[in-house]
Image (cartoon, rainbow, N blue to C red):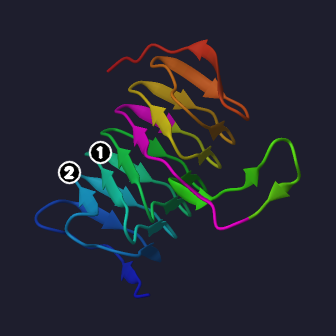
């Protein structure tokens, strides 16, 4: 597999910061999309061999964030801040449990899109699991594990992440 490494580059008159040691497994025209001013900080790793990764204006991925979108889609909206050491996983190994019997590890995979809306803040060390939808105007506390569809206008925390407080976005 060929890795693509970047450091402080400008693409098509768009200010996109690729800090040191950013790795992206594929930059094919249809599976990697950046719109506007974007920052990928130190050690970001995007594994998108067959999946689609897109990120909107004024958004960034914090240092050492890992995105696994080998299959499926990860779509990040505008004005999104993702803290360091986060894991965004649209494609993963899975297990099968047949009728309460012992767990069997086989070549089972789970593929699920991850959609992150606009004006979202995701704290450090969070994990976003397959089939997750985070709407506009959401804050996620550090260390949270996020799964399924969240509601707009809340602060979420915990494992699994649950709404802990109403949040009113002020532009």
List the residue tagged with mark 1.
58
| Badge 2 or badge 1: first in the primary sequence | 2
Q: Is 85 placed above or below 57 here?
A: below
Q: Is 6 placed above or below 74 here?
A: below
Q: CA distance from mark 2 to mark 1?
A: 7 Å
**Outermost residue toward the right?**
102
Q: Is 70 placed above or below 35 here?
A: below
119 drawn magenta: yes
Q: Residue 163: x, y in percent?
A: 62, 19
Q: Residue 105: x, y in percent?
A: 76, 63
**Outermost residue toward the left?**
13
> Residue at horizontal 40%, vertical 76%?
25
113 drawn magenta: yes
Q: Quadrant of residue 26?
A: bottom left
Q: Quadrant of residue 50?
A: bottom left
Quadrant of the rendering where the C terminus is positioned: top left
**In the drawing, does residue 146 fall left or right of residue 153?**
right
> Residue at horizontal 78%, vertical 47%?
98
Mark 2 element type: loop
Boundaries of the magenta span: 106-121
List the residue tagged with mark 2.
36
Quadrant of the rendering where the N terminus is positioned: bottom left
Disc 2 to disc 1: CB gap under 8 Å: yes
**Outermost residue toward the bottom?**
2
């Amino acid at each position: 597999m060929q890795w693509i490494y970047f450091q402080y580059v400008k693409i098509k008159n768009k200010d996109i910061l690729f800090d040191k040691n950013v790795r992206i497994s594929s930059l094919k025209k249809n599976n990697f999309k950046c719109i506007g001013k974007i920052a990928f900080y130190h050690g970001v790793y995007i594994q998108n061999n067959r999946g689609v990764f897109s990120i909107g204006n004024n958004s960034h991925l914090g240092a050492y964030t890992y995105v696994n979108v080998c299959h499926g889609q990860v779509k990040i909206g505008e004005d999104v801040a993702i803290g360091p050491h986060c894991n965004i996983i649209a494609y993963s190994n899975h297990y099968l449990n047949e009728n309460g019997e012992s767990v069997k590890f086989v070549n089972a995979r789970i593929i699920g899109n991850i959609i992150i809306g606009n004006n979202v803040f995701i704290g450090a060390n969070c994990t976003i699991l397959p089939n997750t939808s985070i709407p506009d105007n959401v804050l996620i506390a550090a260390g949270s594990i996020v799964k399924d569809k969240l509601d707009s206008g809340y602060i979420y925390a915990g494992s699994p992440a649950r709404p802990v407080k109403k949040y009113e976005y002020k532009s």
